[in-house]
Image (tube, rainbow, N blue to C red):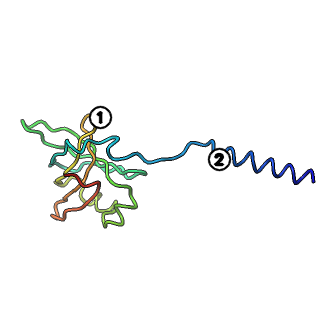
Amino acid sequence: MRIRNMLGVAAIVCGSLLLASPALAHHSFAAEWDSTKCREFTGVLKRVDWQNPHPYFFVDVKEPGGKIENWSFQAYSPVTLRRNGTDRQVFLDNVNKDVWIRGCLSKTGKMNAAAAGTLKFSDGVLRQVGQLQD
C-alpha cells in the first residue's frame, strides 16, 4: 500500500511539473510584421540560414540612389517550404543570383528585416515562401 501511495504522489508531482513547464507557442504574423507596409525587393541572394522555426535568407538589395543594403527575410517553416516544393537546395542553388521578393517590413523596429511572402529566383517561378500579403 505504501508503494502505491508513493507512486501516486510521484505521478502527481510529475504531472504538476509538466504543467509548470513553459508552453511553446508560435507567434502570429501580425505580432512581428506589418501587413500594411509591404513592398517589392530585388537583389542578389547572399546567404541562407536554414533553421527552425523559420529559415532566413539574406539579400543584397540595391536601394534607390544606388546604396546596397543587406536585408534579412523570414520564410515559412522548413517543413512548409518543402511541402510547397521549395527546399533548402533550391535556395543554395540560387546563392549569388538575382531574386525578387514581396515582403512586409518589421513592426518591432528591426532594420532591414522583412517577412517574405513571395519569392522569384532567376528561373522565373513564383514561389510562396511566407504569408501572402495584400
* Residues packed near mark 2 inside 10 Å, few (<14), some (14 to 19) or many (20 plus): few
Quadrant in the rendering for residue 63: top left
Label 2, on which residue? 18
For marks 2 and 1, give the CA distance: 34 Å
Q: Is residue 71 left or right of residue 124?
A: right
Q: Give the label, 2 or 1, closer to the camera.
A: 2
Q: Which of marks 2 and 1 is nearer the N terminus?
A: 2
Seen as rendered, the residue at the extreme right is 1
Q: Is residue 100 left or right of residue 31?
A: left
The answer to which of 107 and 44 lies nearer the viewer is: 107
Q: Which label number is shown at residue 110?
A: 1
For the residue marked with disc 1, what is the amino acid? Lys
Q: Where is residue 115 in the image (x, y as percent from the top left)?
A: 28, 47
Question: Vertical placement of 68 versus 84: above or below?
Answer: above
Seen as rendered, the residue at the extreme left is 65
Is label 2 in a helix, a strand or a loop? helix
For the residue marked with disc 2, what is the amino acid? Leu
* Residues packed near mark 1 inside 10 Å, few (<14), some (14 to 19) or many (20 plus): few
Quadrant in the rendering for residue 87: bottom left
